Image (spheres, grey):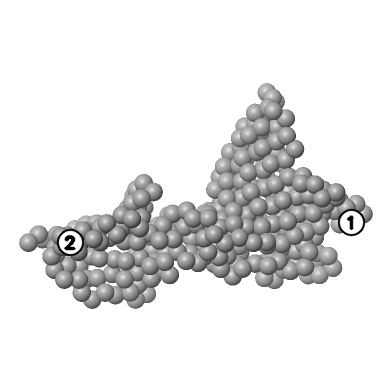
Amino acid sequence: MSDKKYQLAVFNSNGIVHASEYVAEGAPIVNSDAATWAIVKGELWITYSGNTQKYKLISNDAINRYYQVEKTSANGSVKTVVWFYDQKTALAQAQAFINNNEISEVGSNSSPSTYPFSVIWINSLRPSSKNFNISGYVNGMEVTGSGTVTRGAFSTGIFEGVSANRQIKTLTGEFAVGGTTVPMSSYVFDWVNSNYEPLGKSGGDDYFVVRGVPTFPATVRVNDSGALYSAEIYNNSSKSGYIGTVSVTYVVEADTATTALLRIITEERNAFGMIKSTLQSEVKIWPSGEFELIKEIFRGDDSVLIFNY
């Protein structure tokens, strides 16, 4: 009998992992204990009895995901490995165990069933600074560039006659088009209520006022979609000139075993109801409520700009 020890773990989509004792090859699987798991910024976190073990992603070939942690003890260093398989591979491994009594590190990478949309939205408003590269074209000419987008801390103020929270969002950098380098420098204030739901925008080229109350789902699943909110666009806070409308929708798509892709689509129309521009934000989301902005694609008249973060 081999001295190698094995552990059978099943990672469920509800965030629960059931793991057996470490046993020798050929021994029966016993004492399945439940813990919780989540993927947080690329790390696998497993929590049992109040203790959290963090595993770093070593490799990811889109089918097998290999996480590892190294523990140090008096007897030296011990490496613990966790594998995720796609469903087809996991079933094949399980069948091999049944047929041949061969134990291997079998897991399930079924996409988690729910993602806390409201938590993800609030987390996206945390003060932050993120770099990006630009590619695309304007009027048939190639565009390249880079920059930084920064979100500041919230402060209180008055928006549309009511008390609200205000956050400044700035964009700086430069881009080259047609052989000419152009600096970028802009800002806008995002206004939200006490629940961090959007009320509007000010301080930029336009003045946005959200219609009614946004319809934010508490949680979302893969293949979910829907409307989030819409707004009226004016030239300034006096609202003397009507420019058009903006609508914001979302779509959730499958990604990896432990993440999903959230696409936020912002569509702007002019005063005559014609589409003026669209902005699609691609965000990787985790069941824990963490997120990572990956890409934004802006499409306007004779222009497509891609912001890779």
Secondary element type, mark 2: helix
Q: Is residue 291 visible?
A: no
Q: Nearer the viewer, mark 2 or mark 1?
A: 2
Where residue 121 sits in the image (x, y, percent)? 61, 62
Q: Residue at x 15, y 62 (%)?
A: 101
Residue picked out by circle 1: 239
Sooner in the amino-acid sequence: mark 2 or mark 1 = 2
Sort mark 2 into few (<14), some (14-19) or many (20+) by Cα contacts within 10 Å.
few
> Of 88 and 136, which appears nearest the observer?
88
Which label is found at residue 294? none
Q: Quadrant of the C terminus?
A: top right
* Residue under label 2: 99
Residue 36 falls in image quadrant: bottom left
**Left or right: 61 with respect to 201?**
left
Q: Name the side, left or right, on which 62 lies relative to 240.
A: left
Q: Position of residue 37 (x, y in %)?
A: 39, 66
Q: Nearer the viewer, residue 110 or 19?
A: 110
Task: Give amino acid for label 2.
Answer: Asn
